[in-house]
Image (tube, helix red, strand yellow):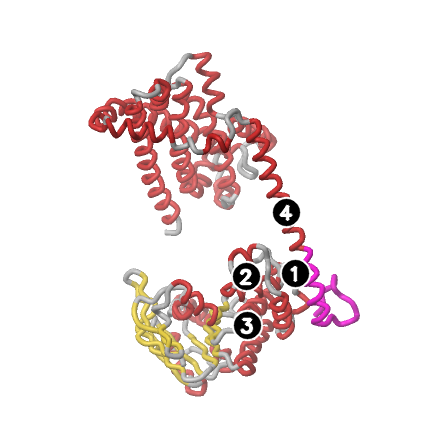
Amino acid sequence: MLHIEKLTKRFGDKIAVDAANISVGQPTMIGIIGRSGAGKSTLLRMLNRLSDASEGTIQFEGEDITSLRGAAMRDWQSRCAMIFQQFNLVPRMDVVSNVLHGTLNKRSTLATMFNLFPQSDIHKAIEILDRLGIAEQAPKRAEALSGGQQQRVAIARALMQDPKIILADEPIASLDPMNAQVVMQSLRTIHEEDGRMVIANLHTLDTARRYCDRVIGMRDGRIVFDGTPEQLTTGVARDIYGAGADFSEAATSTEIETLDRQKVIA
Amino acid sequence: MLDATLGGSTPITVDSIQSSYTAQVKRRRLYGGLTLLIFVLLMVSGFNVADDRNAGGFWDGLHQIGDYPADVLSEAWEKRAELPGLVAKYFPALVETINIAAVSTLIGALGGLFLSLLGTRGLAKWPRLIPLFRRISDIMRAVPEIVIALMLIFVMGGGPVPAMIAIAIHTAGALGKMFSEVAENADLKPVEGLASTGATWSQRMLLGVLPQVAPNYVSYSLLRFEVNIRASAILGFVGAGGLGYELRNAMAWGPGRFDEAAAIFILLFGTIVFFDQISSHYRNRLTEGQGQ
């Protein structure tokens, strides 16, 4: 289904992603872990074609994604939805309008300008919001919502695209634990009920273990681990995060930072 | 989790949300359509009024719009051998024009700096006088350069100095406004830190505020310099010297001296492109270099 071969991204002489190879046979929920700057976000951005690859290819169902240009590239982007850490909604527009932005690829600029979305799309948007449990917020401005609600609006926008793949770049990194659970559970439900592939960058190990079928570990741009959550032992996790022997099992990135700081003090 | 404003004891169904939102969308589309209609009506009626009052008539004159440039171009092409000589002849006038622009930008930027610091909340030396300094910069910006220049030429006679003063006054007003908007966003913590050491107001501004705002200030000043080159060329038309003065003479003489007009156009166009490129290059470097 999805084949990534030797995918590389350079910024000047710095290599952000170094010859990544990933092959996915069927819709799976994949978690990518690694510390900040490991190249997780760059990898997802290349998949969505928000940024171009320096080398290598991405193939989806036999189609070469890396060579797409113009309208064909935007068509791919509409089939490959993306969710961001900071939600990236239009803050001054209402929730339903933000969800309807998921259909922009199929609409002309003129129709968008006069807000001429079909009635059926509006109803579908509200149904998706209802599925995510935030239908009551429909007429409010996106900026009036809490972080967790905004992230669910972003997921609704992604679902409105009816995508094959949903990419989630640190979807829960700016949410409190309660909202993080709701958002991760929504992504898992979407994967199980709709059979869509979900690829999520995650900061915390336990989230990856709990929600994902497959975990990919990245360190300094390279893929250093690719396997099931069960294979992700503490030793492997230490390697991925480059942490010492005092690395704890349920460690999060914040905890690693505190560990590092303690080492400096000591 | 129902919102208080929507909140009723009855649960809100998807259907009711859909119908109420659809009604909202319809209302919004109606307003949008009406706004568009009013806009089109205003445009059409405004155009007709303007066309009626026009001495010649827009549609009658439209086909003649290319005549003057065509005359200038054809005559300049016939005498193309003389063009380099003419360009060299008018080069000193160009230097005068750029000189006026450079001096007035420098003086105006200095004036704008003081107006902005004295007119920004949190930074002003005399907080009660903030409205005064703001109004001063409003007035300086509101009066067009050409009006000030005409007044000064009437008093002092023609030449580059009145033009310089006129542009400097306008620049100080315009930059004062832009500068104070940048200064409003400056971080006040360094200023407070300096105040705690017993620094004077000018020391606090110089060391606490200027380092933060300098890249933006320089960038705005460079933009203003570009604008001022154009302004100083225009002021030549009212007798303030420089390239504009020569251009007016060449154009007023009519056919026979169009080659001179063409030479001046080439100089003016080349200069504006040149300074546009240089200043946009440096402005980019300033804004991109900020993060480093």
Measure the C-alpha gap from mark 2 to mark 1. 13 Å
- Residue A86 against residue A241 in the figure, above or below: above
Disc 4 target residue: B35
Mark 4 lies on a secondary structure that is helix
Q: Is residue B38 left or right of residue B102?
A: right
The residue depicted at 37 percent of the width and 28 percent of the height is B68
Residue kind at label 1, given as amino acid type? Lys
Say whether residue B183 is visible. yes
Disc 1 target residue: A140
**On the rendered image, what quadrant is the N terminus of chain B found in?**
bottom right
Disc 3 target residue: A159
Discs 3 and 1 carry the same chain letter: yes
Disc 2 target residue: A89
Contact? badges 4 and 3 (CB < 8 Å): no
* Residue A235 on image: x %, y %: 39, 83
Contact? badges 2 and 1 (CB < 8 Å): no
Measure the C-alpha gap from mark 2 to mark 4. 27 Å
* Residue B288 on image: x %, y %: 37, 49
* Residue B237 on image: x %, y %: 40, 21
The residue depicted at 40 percent of the width and 40 percent of the height is B219
Which badge, 3 or 2, is on the more N-terminal residue? 2
**10 Å neighbourhood of mark 4: few (<14), some, or many (≥20)?**
few
Magenta stretch in the rendered image: B1-27
**10 Å neighbourhood of mark 3: few (<14), some, or many (≥20)?**
many
Discs 1 and 4 carry the same chain letter: no
Q: Quadrant of residue A266?
A: bottom left
The chain ID associated with circle 3 is A
